[in-house]
Image (tube, helix red, strand yellow):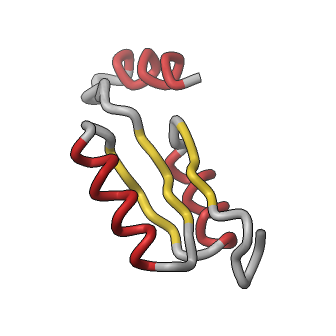
Amino acid sequence: MAAGRDRQAAYAGERVSTQPLVLVADDEARITKLVSIVLSEEGCRVVTASGGEEALRKAEEIRPDIVLLDIVMPDLD
């Protein structure tokens, strides 16, 4: 799926990134921050969400390569 998106971006003249895009969703800010730091150090692009609703919205918007999701959150799990 990511390869198809990269090809479409290349055809459109956009810059194509080889770094995986990861969406990290957790209602505990310290966990989100820690995971983001580690993933960034490993060469990933990271987007965060602090709840289920926000995670769904961002997932539709940015189309991440992978989602790391806390399975128990207050607004939606």
- The outermost residue toward the right is 77
Quadrant (top left/top right/bottom left/bottom right) for the N terminus: top right
Tally of marks: 0
Which residue is found at the position 27% from the left and 48% from the top?
Answer: 40
Q: Position of residue 33 (x, y in %)?
A: 35, 68
Q: Is residue 49 above or below residue 65?
A: below
Q: Image check: 54 left or right of 20? A: right
Residue 74 position in % (x across, y down): 72, 84
What residue is drawn where x is 72% and y is 63%? 71
19 vs 22, left or right, is: left
Taking the image as shown, residue 53 lies to the left or right of residue 45, namely right
Q: Which residue appears at 51% of the width and 25% of the height? A: 2
Q: Is residue 30 above or below residue 16?
A: below
Which is nearer the eye, 66 or 1? 66
- Give residue 63's quadrant in the image: top right
- The x and y percentages for residue 29 are 43, 79
Q: Which quarter of the rendering shows the C terminus?
A: bottom right
Q: Is residue 63 positioned above or below 74 on the image?
A: above
